[in-house]
Amino acid sequence: MAIPVYLEAGSKRAFACALDWPGWCRVGKGEASALEALAAYAPRYGVVAAEARVPFPPGDPDALEADAFEVAERVAGSKNADFGTLGSPLPRDAEPLTAEEAARQAALLSAAWSVFDRLVAGAPAELRKGPRGGGRNRDAIVRHVVEAEAGAYAPRIGLRLVAPPPGDAPALRAHRDAILAVLDKGAPAHTGKGWPLRYAARRFTWHVLDHAWEIEDRREPSAG
């Protein structure tokens, strides 16, 4: 069975996102390369699904090809797509959530945090720089993820959060639990003037995983 995705294309880059799998979104120089990147990251997303105990698409994730996807929708991307950031919610994101769907998306976000934490714990403080010498180091990435969730994302789902201090595990758990409590709801699908909950789950989970995989890719190679 084909995996439904949507494509969001800017003038320079495009996103491909799996509609039923929050956070499984990748960017490419065009639609074709975005779909190829999405397929290439299936094994990594499979780790998240396994952590959440959610059955992943049938077949071997390691052998998934771009033709496994069915493009269900195309949306015009804003400048956000060109900067590597997801754009606005889809009209379908306003559809009501069942209790099962809401619990599933919360489980996948929780699993993404777990994967992120493991990768952080296994990474050195100094990460390999990008081709132009850029990129945050490990602790700066951790701060960025938490601060974005508290300052930019949480208000969009009706929460007022303060980013927990680095190393404060109880405060971090409370921060995440507050977010999950909102996402783990059925109807209504919306939190007022903010983000629809389907989009919120996609955006939170994508951001966590994008930086988790960045850390994974930028770890210094082991000696030998």
Image: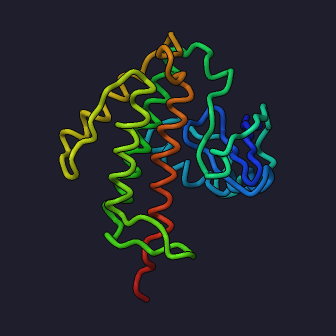
Q: Nearer the viewer, residue 69 or 202?
A: 202
What x and y, as percent, mark residue 72?
A: 78, 31
Residue 32 vertical placement versus 19 (above, below): below
User: In the image, is 63 to the left or to the right of 194?
Assistant: right
Please report the residue visible at 36 percent of the width from the left and 29 percent of the height from the top: 179
User: In the image, is 175 to the left or to the right of 25?
Assistant: left
Please report the residue visible at 47 percent of the width from the left and 16 percent of the height from the top: 191
Residue 42 vertical placement versus 195 (above, below): below
The N terminus sits in image quarter: top right
In which quadrant of the rendered view does residue 120 lie? bottom left
What x and y, as percent, mark residue 19?
A: 66, 33
Please report the residue visible at 35 percent of the width from the left and 56 percent of the height from the top: 118
The C terminus sits in image quarter: bottom left
Q: Nearer the viewer, residue 56 or 30?
A: 30
Residue 16 vertical placement versus 4 (above, below): below
Going by the picture, which residue comes out furthest to the bottom? 224
What x and y, as percent, mark residue 65?
A: 76, 53
Please report the residue visible at 40 percent of the width from the left and 86 percent of the height from the top: 223
What x and y, as percent, mark residue 208?
A: 45, 47
